Amino acid sequence: MGSLRQAWLQRGVLARLLWPLSLLFGALAGIRRALYRTGLLQTERVRVPVVVVGNVIAGGSGKTPVVMAIVRHLRARGIMAGVVSRGYGRATDDCREVLDDSDPRDVGDEPALIRHSTRAPVFVARKRIEAARALLERHPDTQVIVSDDGLQHLALARDIEICVFDDRGVGNGWLLPAGMLREQWPRRCDLVIHTGAQPAFHGFTVRKSLAEYALRRDGRRVPLESLTDRKLIAVAAIAKPEAFFQMLKDRSLMPAQCIALPDHHDFDDWALPTDSGQTLICTEKDAVKLWRKAPDALAVPLVFEPSAAFFTALDAKLSSLDGHQAA
């Protein structure tokens, strides 16, 4: 998979060999969009505005932190926001609410993180329209629904589309599997936000850093400066684990070992370090799963701050929607 991801960044030999398949992928995607456009496949609308946060590229680009930032922003304005998601990688296939004690294996690690971090109502379902209906039935005071991913899930009507990019931009500009694009870019989109340090083209930006503390399982905070003399083992099962390891070093934390695992890894078959003198440190996303096996592990939150201009633009678009309760 690593060689394929590398091939997506340039139009080399492997990408050119896969290019005919990308034409087929594009044709099938175009037919699917046409079926929704003509009404042969149904798009359903719910009674509140829907904001979809997604991407047109394969792989993690930082959608979930954007979702959490939006939810916090809306709730700070007094707007009741809920979240829907497919729940990538979960063992179940039904529609269910993500609760405080939900097993990430049953709801997905990212929905569990969103619930844990924002306290907002979160529902997962294979079909996001089902999750949206269930959320509104269980939490009728919800005023805005934010969809974590789902840009290509056209069965759920949306009012605002937000495309998220990282430093890869659109890669070599080709569709899957020759490139990283799920659909052609540019495409119509309400807002574009870049989560990387070097945006490839125009859009809103974010500022990212680690918090000045780590969290214990019970919510207590441990200042990072108190960990500088500890023997640490850093673990990350995210899209870009090396970014987390570097951010730790930028905070003067020098782990004795850095362990990178596949994105969404469930840790079920992962062996804990046997040295009792070592402290596990991880991301919040990993902690919701790792705490099952290592309750003493420390999770370092990510401080993720989209530019003020991004929220101003989002607020303006929400305010322009007919019937928006909090406009």
Image (tube, rainbow, N blue to C red):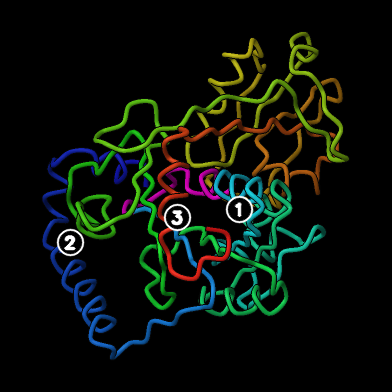
Name above or below for residue 298 compared with residue 99: above
- Residue 321 x, y percent position in the rendering: 42, 64
Give the magenta-colored segment's residue range.
56-68
Q: Nearer the viewer, residue 262 or 85?
A: 85
Badge 3: residue crowd in 10 Å (few <14, some 14–19, many ≥20): many
Residues tagged 2 and 1 counted as in contact (Cβ below 8 A): no
What is the secondary structure assignment of the residue under circle 2? helix
Name above or below for residue 203 compared with residue 24. above
Is the residue marked by circle 1 packed among few (<14), some (14-19), or many (20+) residues within 10 Å? Answer: many
Q: Which circle marks residue 304 in the picture? A: none
Which disc, if any, is residue 22? 2
Q: What x and y, as percent, mark residue 76?
A: 66, 45
Dot 3 falls on a residue whose secondary structure is strand
Front in this rendered view, residue 323 or 160:
323
The residue sitting at 28% across, 88% down in the picture is 39
The type of residue carrying mark 1 is Glu
Q: CA distance from mark 3 to mark 1?
A: 13 Å
Look at label 3 and name its amino acid: Val
Q: Give the labeled residue for mark 3.
A: 53
Q: Nearer the viewer, mark 3 or mark 1?
A: 3
Q: Is residue 62 magenta?
A: yes
The local secondary structure at tag 1 comes to helix
Marks 3 and 1, the one that precedes in the sequence = 3
Name the residue: 25% across, 80% down: 37
**Type of amino acid under label 2:** Ser
Choose the circle earlier in sequence order: 2 or 1.
2
Residue in front for this viewpoint, 243 or 63: 63
Mark with earlier residue (3, 2): 2
Q: Position of residue 100 (x, y in %)?
A: 80, 57
* Furthest residue in direction bottom, as rendered: 40
> Which residue was labeled with disc 1?
110
